[in-house]
Amino acid sequence: MARPLRAPRRLRSLTAALAAALALAWLGGFIWFVGRASAPSPLPPHADGVVALTGGADRIPAALRLLQEGRAERLLISGVGPEVTEAHLSRLAGVDLAAFGDRVTIGHEATTTEGNAEETAHWAQAHGVRSLIVVTAAYHMERALTEIGRVLPDARLYPMPVRPPALRAGGIGALRLLLAEYTKFLAATLGLTKLEAGWRSDTT
């Protein structure tokens, strides 16, 4: 009488164990991610520059306050739509950008977080920026730091997150937002940013 084959059973057990381990790792990472997005952030130290990644109404005013308070020498507003003027941004922020002279640069090239990073790197290299305060939504911060850190590996990055209304509201909407951004963050961490094509930074 032939012996029953045990290899398939062992293979199924190994596959199930691997799937369980991956699920636990994913869940642990998501809990860490939510904690990072929810934790308060201290005011950053003085830096050479500030970059505000567009996509939320609170980001530009927060970055301009850092400039007004003397926490940085210059500011890049990255990912501004080509149709958006300095006057429009001034009305949005409630501050006349012209008053800052050439200390404020408006970047129109970026349409994704990866593009924000590249635009930031070009600006930083042009102005000798070696320390940078990054202003973006709290749930977007880890991905932004990952992308910027990849193209500016020698720069010191200081997060300055803002909490948008969607995150402050909580509930299922905030959970969906965090799940979607966690997936994008994992893709960025794994170097799969080309899959982000079509995702604008203002949808993160």
Image (spheres, grey):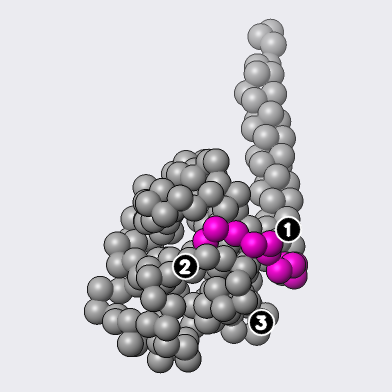
Q: Position of residue 140 (x, y in %)?
A: 55, 64
Task: Please tell me in which quadrant of the rendered image residue 87 appears.
Answer: bottom left
In the image, what residue type sits under mark 3? Arg
Q: Nearer the viewer, residue 172 or 68?
A: 68
Residue 131 visible at all: yes
Disc 2 to disc 1: CB gap under 8 Å: no
Q: Which mark is residue 203?
A: none
Q: What is the CA distance from the residue labelled 2 to the residue labelled 1?
A: 33 Å
Q: Are there few (<14), some (14-19), or many (20+) residues within 10 Å of tag 2?
A: many
Q: Nearer the viewer, residue 74 or 90?
A: 74
Q: Position of residue 172 (x, y in %)?
A: 63, 77
Q: Earlier in the sequence, mark 2 or mark 1?
A: 1
Residue beneath disc 1: 31
Closest to the camera, between mark 2 and mark 1, is 2
Secondary structure category for the residue under label 3: helix
Residue 114 visible at all: no
Range drawn in magenta: 39-49
Q: Is residue 163 magenta?
A: no
In the image, what residue type sits under mark 2? Leu
Disc 1 to disc 3: CB gap under 8 Å: no
Task: Please tell me in which quadrant of the rendered image residue 15 appears.
Answer: top right
In the image, what residue type sits under mark 1? Ile
Asked if residue 171 is positioned above or below residue 32 in the image, the reply reads: below
Q: What is the CA distance from the residue labelled 3 to the residue labelled 2?
A: 26 Å
Most extreme residue toward the left is 83
Residue beneath disc 3: 168
